[in-house]
Image (cartoon, helix red, strand yellow):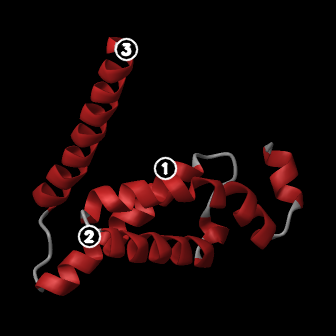
Amino acid sequence: MTEANVAELSAEESFRAEALRWIPNVARYARLLTRNQDDAEDLAQETYLRAFQNWATFRLGTDCRKWLFTICRNVFLRSRERHTGVPLSISARWSLTRSTRTTRRRSARSCCECSQSR
C-alpha cells in the first residue's frame, strides 16, 4: 500500500492496513521476550492497544513493524519494572535487546542450515 493511498484512509482503516498485518511478527517477538505463551498474548494485545491509541504519532512511510516492535519492547520492559519494583538499568535494557537479536539470528541460521542439508 502506497503512502498516498494510506493517507486517504481514516485512522482506523490505515491502522488496519498498516499495523494488523504484523500481528504474527509481534506475537512471535512477544513470545521471545516473555518465554511464556499466555504472557506473550497479553503483551501483544497491550502492544496493539497502545499502537492504536498512538496511531496519530506514527509517520506514514516509515517501518510500521519496527515501530510496533519498539512499543512491544517498551511495554515489556515497563511491565518487568513494575513487577520487580526495580527499574532496569540501561545496560540491562541493552543486553535484553542484544540477546533477542542474537536469538533471532541463531534461529534464522539454524533454519537455513536445516533447509540446506535436505
Single out the residue that lies furthest toward the front.
118
Q: Residues within 10 Å of mark 2 (few under 14, many from 20)?
A: some
- Looking at the image, is 41 positioned above or below residue 84? above
Q: Which residue position holds label 2?
A: 77
Q: Residues within 10 Å of mark 1 (few under 14, many from 20)?
A: few
> Looking at this view, is 29 or 90 the one in front?
29
Going 60% across and 79% down the picture, which residue do you hit? 53
Q: Which residue position holds label 3?
A: 118
Using the numbered discs, state the Cα–Cα distance from disc 3 to disc 2 in whole angstroms. 40 Å
Q: In the drawing, does residue 91 fall left or right of residue 98?
A: left
Residue type at mark 3 is: Arg
Residue 30 figure quarter: bottom left
Q: In the drawing, does residue 42 fall left or right of residue 16?
A: left
Looking at marks 3 and 2 on the same chain, the residue that comes earlier in the sequence is marked by 2
Looking at marks 1 and 3 on the same chain, the residue that comes earlier in the sequence is marked by 1
Q: Which residue position holds label 1?
A: 66
